[in-house]
Image (cartoon, rainbow, N blue to C red):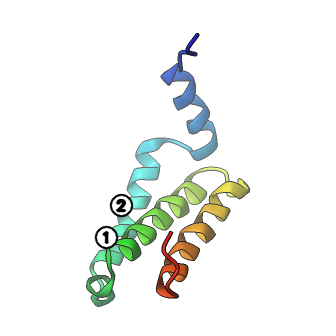
Amino acid sequence: MIETINIDETLAERGSRYGKFKDHARISQEIKKVMQKTEGWEKLGDNGREALEMIAHKIARILNGDPNYADSWVDIAGYAKLVGDQLQGLDR
């Protein structure tokens, strides 16, 4: 039998961990706007841009929600490592 996922339960759990989505979205979008306005943004490839956007997303979750949730911090390190590895010739 396939387990049915209750989206309302999932959203409630995420909200308790990361705060209100509208507040998270505002923080995340402001960070991304600043990044995209810099000269360096144009020098990045798709993977660098995506990694920085995901890091901005994780930073917003930390600032808007539970700053002691280790997974958010580990995710930031992971995205940075993916780009660092790619720049060193490792394709993941």
User: Tag 1: Cα neighbours inside 10 Å, few (<14), some, or many (≥20)?
Assistant: few
In the depicted view, which residue is nearer to us: 84 or 28? 84
**Relative vertical location of residue 5 with respect to residue 13 in this rendering, above or below:** above
Among the 4 quarters of the image, the one containing residue 46: bottom left
What residue is rendered at 36% in x and 61% in y? 29
Which percent across, then down, holds residue 55? 50, 66
Instruction: Give the position of the N terminus as an image quadrant.
Output: top right
- Residue 17, quarter of picture: top right
Residue 67 image position (x, y, % from top left)? 68, 57
Depth check: give the residue in front, 19 or 77: 77
Residue positioned 56% across, 44% down in the render: 19
Left or right, 72 with reference to 31: right
- Tell me: 63 left or right of 52: right
> Label for residue 33?
1
Q: Amino acid at mark 2?
A: Gln
Say which element carries label 1: helix
Q: Is residue 61 left or right of residue 43?
A: right
Which residue lies at the image location 58% right of the left edge and 75% below the top edge? Answer: 81
| Callout 2 touching callout 1 (CB < 8 Å) | yes
- Residue beneath disc 2: 29
